[in-house]
Image (spheres, grey):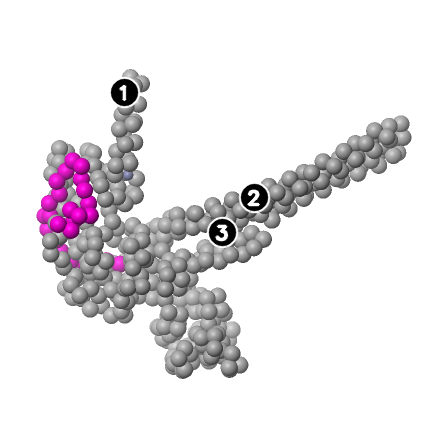
Amino acid sequence: MKPSESPIDLKDFSKRAFEALGSVVEEWGAAGLDVLVADDLVSYFRGQDILRLSFSPLEASERDETQRVTLGSPVLEGLLHVLSNKGLLARAYLNPLHAESRNVEEKFARKFHWENAKPYLKSSSLEETGRACFQFKVSFLSDDRIERLYLISVNLTTFLEEVRLLREWDLLFFEHERRYEGVAAFCLPDVDRVSERAVVFLRKRISPELENMKAFQEKFLKRDLLRIGDYYHELFREIGRKEAKAEGDPSLLDRVRKRKTAVALDRQKKIRDAVEKYRLDVRAEIVNLLILYQPWMRCVFGFKSRSGDLERVFYWDPVLKDFSDYACEQCQIPSSTFMVRGPKFICLKCKEVKDENIRMAHAQS
Ligand SMILES: [Zn+2]
């Protein structure tokens, strides 16, 4: 399964969700669920208290009363509606075999570089981290409707996007129980801050596709506008000729001028319609949210530099077997090579910009 497709088994998701909401669920066949809907939820499912659900296209066709569950089907919409109203989400754990790593300094030196500082490990400890994995359904609406699913993962400790996690999604082993001990439970941060970050990452992700679609729409709009322009240009020339002929006949001239006004209004309307037709609207909604927990190693590194001794926290991820990304303290974009500038760690791009600014300031003075 690719990250852009549904990362979560719909049947499993629905089963757990219905159960968590107090309904009784029984499996049937290879991909079916019978649900005795909890009383307080019946209104979300069009008043039905018993649901026979199928998650396979084959089984659904055999039985009349069976409802096929797909993304966007009434049952799933109802379920997501309840879940969002009740503030319930799916939760899973990644349980690494070994949470702690040896040779942390070596691994660190392989991932990160400092041009003017020397890092050394000061201390390390185990911590739990969480990440919010949002599945967004994005609708691109114009005269056509295109829908796509996007999976976005935000680390809830660093608030950085976890692209690497999504790339390895297929290889991850999700469990519903926590199998590590001696680590304090992770406290979920403020939900607004998390969704704000998720939306920033989603915007970035859809931007190439959106630009493509915009260019496509603009091409067609331009073509239509040219066509409209040509058509009315001809029409106005003809009206101009009639106007010239009607000189000296006030009643005919009046009629021709009224026609001219009507045609001008008509042209405006045609242009407005064309612009409206190719207007691109984008709407996004969360269809799923998975909170993923795991332990990781909090490593405090010291840095000897000309600005003195600095200290920063980095995280070793035992599931991805890599250090978690670190963002430039100037532009907030993750990087692997840094410069110490005053109290900040900045990436090489920001360093160039700063150098350029200094040169400009010197040139001006
Ligand atoms: Zn930067």
Q: Position of residue 270 (x, y in %)?
A: 67, 44
1 or 121: nearer the eye?
1
* Sequence-first tag of 3 and 2: 2
User: Is 67 situated left or right of 336 in this image?
Assistant: right
Overall secondary structure of the magenta section = strand
* Secondary structure state at the residue bearing disc 2: helix
Read off the residue under disc 2: 219
Q: Is mark 3 within 8 Å of ligand 1?
A: no
Kindly identify which numbered label has been placed on residue 362: 1
Highlighted range, magenta:
106-130
Q: Residue at x 37, y 50 (%)?
A: 201
Q: Quadrant of the N terminus?
A: bottom left
Q: Is mark 2 within 8 Å of ligand 1?
A: no
68 or 178: nearer the eye?
68
Q: Residue at x 83, y 29 (%)?
A: 244
Measured in 3D between alpha carbons, the distance from the residue under mark 3 to the one under mark 1, in whole angstroms, is: 46 Å
CB under 8 Å between callouts 3 and 2?
A: no
User: Is 58 situated left or right of 135 in this image?
Assistant: right
Indicate which label's residue lies in the foreground, 3 or 2: 2
Q: Amino acid at mark 2?
A: Lys
* Sequence-first tag of 1 and 2: 2
Mark 1 Cα-neighbour bin, 10 Å: few <14, some 14–19, many ≥20:
few
Q: Residue at x 63, y 41 (%)?
A: 225
Q: Position of residue 101 (x, y in %)?
A: 13, 57
Q: Amino acid at mark 3?
A: Val
272 or 3: nearer the eye?
3
Q: How many marks?
A: 3
Read off the residue under disc 3: 282
* Sequence-first tag of 3 and 1: 3
Instruction: Based on the picture, tell me whether residue 117 belongs to the magenta stretch.
Output: yes
